Image (cartoon, rainbow, N blue to C red):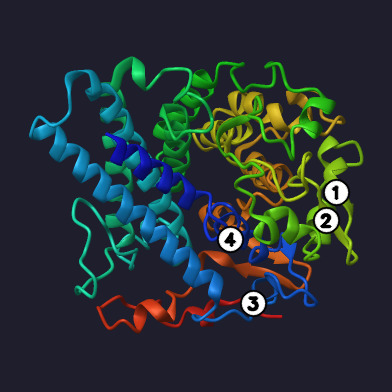
């Protein structure tokens, strides 16, 4: 059991590493979707907002490598735990804990798979299902230099949803162990975080009923309201002060916990938006009403322009938790699902949870009243709510938005996909490149 404990800690460490959700996989999408601009003077993320990155760019290679370390490490640990259960090595008193660990490994594996397929493959759609996805790891990890190939986008999502189901099954086997106060917290990818992931995955697949059910379950497991406009929406002070902390907030469903002992320092998100001079683009800032409390999180950038204080640590500038799934995302997912299903009043009700952060919006009567306008508002509301949290790239591709930034207009981002790192292609083991990926960059 001690092996699986340390293996699980190792996987969480990789998930929170700067090359994955600790920075790159969280932020890179904002720099490629008209949200943020990297600084030419510091060089950090500049090639992404300027669209001059290549298949040899370090960030693309690092995300790919650490993502596959998560997939491989989780799979090996699941296999080891299952073997120990099968041969009787695990004591009866240890079985609940073992299943709890297995559930978390499957959940983290699904999480990594979701980010990898959205970075290195086209978005899920009927027309893209047969397009190349990622190298799929199910129960066997390929040996070094073994011949591999990419599954399709549909195959990849099938594996992700399989891992989600396997996680749910394992948590059910774990029973009270999985629902204990420790593992039901936002610091673990337990059932609460898993349901949030499930909501995001099924939303990406266009299964709106499954996405809404999972989002509502995640909110219920959080246990502090139902995520509607009549919910106890956090006060202005509570919302604006929750950022930069190292304790879980009422918003957190799964968050990467950081501390002085696990300090990303120069590789932190705050350093990126602070002393590395990344800024929020004007087209984003202009979407905020004058009485939107979220605009108070903007500040003058050290190198000019406007930046965000979301990740400015309270105890140390580069140290704060990094939210992956928040309650507000679940409310917006439910609102979108209801809108797509034609339930306007319910969509407005859930949309109001975040929209009320603009104090000029006081009731559902202040929100759009038809499906098309609601979906357009939800798309822009997700921009306002998730500045610097890395959602826009994934949202815009999923929703089919034409994206405009301060330096380009009406880009069809659905057709774009990042290149597979050249280091992977050059192994000669069979992984195919995304052909002609650079043909679908925006025109300046």
Q: Nearer the viewer, mark 3 or mark 4?
A: 4
Numbered disc 2: secondary structure:
strand
Alpha carbon of mark 3 to alpha carbon of mark 4: how far? 16 Å
Alpha carbon of mark 1 to alpha carbon of mark 2: how far? 6 Å
Question: Which residue in the protein does label 1 denote?
Answer: 298
Above or below, 54 against 17 in this view is below
The answer to whether residue 121 is seen in the rendering is: no
Q: Quadrant of residue 66?
A: bottom left
Question: Which residue in the protein does label 2 denote?
Answer: 307
Numbered disc 4: secondary structure:
helix
Considering only order in the chain, which callout, 4 or 3, is on the residue closer to the N terminus? Answer: 4
Alpha carbon of mark 4 to alpha carbon of mark 1: how far? 21 Å
Question: Which residue in the protein does label 4 denote?
Answer: 24
Task: Confirm or deny contact between disc 1 and disc 2 (CB under 8 A).
Answer: yes
Question: Which residue in the protein does label 3 denote?
Answer: 51
Considering only order in the chain, which callout, 4 or 2, is on the residue closer to the N terminus? Answer: 4
Residue visible at 69% across and 42% down? 320
Q: Which corner quadrant holds the N terminus?
A: top left
């Amino acid at each position: 059991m001690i092996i699986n404990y340390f293996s699980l800690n190792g996987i969480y460490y990789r998930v929170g590493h700067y090359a994955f959700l600790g920075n790159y996989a969280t932020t890179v999408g904002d720099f490629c979707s008209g949200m943020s601009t990297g600084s030419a003077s510091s060089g950090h993320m500049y090639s992404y907002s300027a669209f001059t990155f290549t298949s040899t760019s370090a960030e693309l290679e690092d995300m790919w490598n650490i993502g596959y370390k998560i997939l491989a490490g989780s799979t090996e640990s699941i296999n080891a735990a299952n073997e120990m259960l099968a041969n009787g090595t695990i004591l009866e008193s240890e079985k609940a804990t073992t299943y709890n660990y297995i559930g978390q490994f499957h959940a983290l594996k699904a999480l990594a798979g979701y980010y990898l397929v959205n970075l290195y493959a086209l978005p899920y759609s009927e027309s893209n299902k047969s397009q190349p996805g990622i190298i799929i790891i199910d129960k066997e990890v390929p040996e070094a230099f073994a011949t591999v190939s990419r599954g399709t986008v549909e195959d990849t999502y099938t594996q992700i949803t399989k891992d989600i189901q396997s996680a749910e099954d394992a948590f059910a086997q774990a029973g009270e162990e999985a629902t204990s106060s420790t593992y039901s917290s936002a610091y673990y990818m337990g059932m609460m975080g898993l349901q949030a992931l499930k909501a995001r995955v099924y939303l990406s697949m266009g299964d709106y009923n499954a996405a809404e059910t999972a989002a509502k379950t995640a909110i219920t497991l959080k246990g502090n309201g139902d995520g509607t406009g009549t919910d106890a929406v956090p006060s202005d002070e509570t919302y604006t002060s929750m950022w930069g902390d190292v304790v879980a907030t009422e918003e957190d469903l799964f968050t990467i916990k950081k501390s002085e002992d696990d300090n990303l320092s120069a590789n932190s998100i705050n350093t990126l938006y602070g002393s590395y001079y990344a800024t929020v683009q004007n087209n984003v800032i202009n979407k905020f009403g004058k009485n939107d409390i979220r605009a108070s999180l903007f500040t003058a950038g050290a190198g000019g322009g406007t930046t965000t204080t979301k990740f400015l640590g309270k105890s140390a500038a580069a140290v704060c938790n990094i939210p992956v799934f928040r309650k507000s995302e679940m409310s917006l997912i439910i609102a979108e699902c209801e809108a797509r299903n034609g339930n306007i009043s319910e969509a407005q009700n859930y949309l109001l949870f975040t929209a009320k952060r603009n104090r000029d919006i006081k009731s559902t009567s202040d929100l759009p009243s038809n499906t098309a306008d609601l979906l357009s508002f939800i798309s822009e509301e997700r921009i306002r709510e998730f500045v610097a949290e890395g959602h826009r790239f994934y949202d815009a591709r999923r929703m089919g938005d034409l994206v405009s930034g301060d330096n380009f207009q009406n880009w069809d981002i659905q057709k774009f996909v990042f290149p597979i790192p050249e280091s992977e292609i050059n192994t000669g083991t069979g992984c195919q490149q995304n052909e002609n990926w650079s043909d679908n960059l925006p025109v300046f």
